[in-house]
Image (spheres, rainbow, N blue to C red):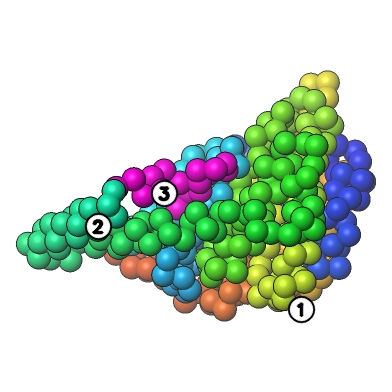
Amino acid sequence: YGECGMPISDLFPHIATCVDDIAMIRSMVSKFPEHTNANYFLHTGIGIQGRPSMGSWVTYGLGSENENLPGYVVLDGGLIPPGGLDNFKNGFLPASHQASILRAGDTPLANIIPSENPASLQKSKLHLAKKMDESLLGKLGQADQIESAIRNYELAYKMQAAIPELTDISGESKLTQKLYGLDSDDPNTRSYAAQCLLARKLVESGVRFIELTCPRVNADRWDQHSGLKKGHELNAHAVDQPIAGLLKDLKRRGLLETTLVVFAGEFGRTPFSQGRDGRDHNPSAFSIWLAGAGIKGGTIYGQTDEYGYRVVENETSIHDLHATMLHLMGINHEELRFRFSGRDIRLTDVHGQVIKGILA
């Protein structure tokens, strides 16, 4: 049963059809009961701002497979998590590893359509900017921000050709668009469907790490301190069909076995009411699910007490989740390090164990 008292299969009927590909972890815990710090913890492995996001760690460790696109992309559906863009920053890693934010709508990125006429004028400007940066770099020596600026100018120029084609979904078949819910009567479902379909196209294009944020529904991002049943139902309806469509589409294209999908929030809700019809934050027990690359589908891992308030079996930390995600990407979390402030730092700090019970 979900937090609003409905069976999960009723709250997410489309995702329920993908249960054979999903591993559910029912024993997640967090160190923070407040949104901002808990989101920093979920994204960066530490509850304060300024550390590298997991997407930055992944691109630092694996690089990018497409020289015309960023390795780390966040699709902004309308609600950036509490903590803001610091959830997606590179921290002390090279600046080229921070996320690129693509917005929902017809213009996913500012200035993505070339405005210079003729096109050679823009090339001349970029060439001049590169020469000036390289001249400054020659005087200063190694400077990450300047080196990253040069790479970012070059990447931005390449993206002007790649992004408009990538974000154009008119070439997708009507059956595919229907699978994701782009024909839905609910504009929130259509919005999230467009994100999920774009995520699939980014996966096909070799983007390493993609995060989708909440759509702007007529309820606050799964944070119902009142009106929980109605709010959760609206949120679930917005994401259910698009997520199921993404899983099914990845699977039929042979991409799910090499793509890890994680559906998670920063903490859960209490099993008892707050006020008349709400629930408060609960970092002591919550659920997430994973699917795809190396995951044992149909698995339920961990258990809470009879009230759903605290974990009683297979307690799983955010560090364990990060260690497992890196493991499934072929990275040993204990060996992915960066020297900063006099010591070697990891995404998982000195913690984290791979969750072997959900691995195929």
Query: Is label 2 in a helix, a strand or a loop?
Result: helix
Judging depth in this view, the residue of 14 and 324 nearest the camera is 14
What is the spatial separation of the Cα atoms under label 3 and label 1, in whole angstroms? 41 Å
| Kind of residue indicated by mark 2 | Ser
Label 3 vs label 1, nearer the camera = 3
The residue beneath circle 3 is: 112
Closer to the N terminus: mark 3 or mark 1?
Answer: 3
CA distance for labels 2 and 3? 16 Å
Image mark for residue 120: 2
Q: Is residue 291 magenta?
A: no
Residue 255 placement (x, y as % from top left): 68, 73
Labelled pair 1, 2 in contact (Cβ < 8 Å): no
Q: Percent x, y for residue 315?
A: 73, 59
Point out the frontmost of discs 1 and 2: 2
Under mark 3, the amino acid is: Ile
* Residue 263 shows up from this direction: yes
Q: Quadrant of residue 309?
A: top right
Q: Would you place residue 32 above or below residue 56 in this image?
A: above
Q: Give the Cα distance between marks 1 and 2.
A: 53 Å
Q: Which residues are magenta?
A: 100-116
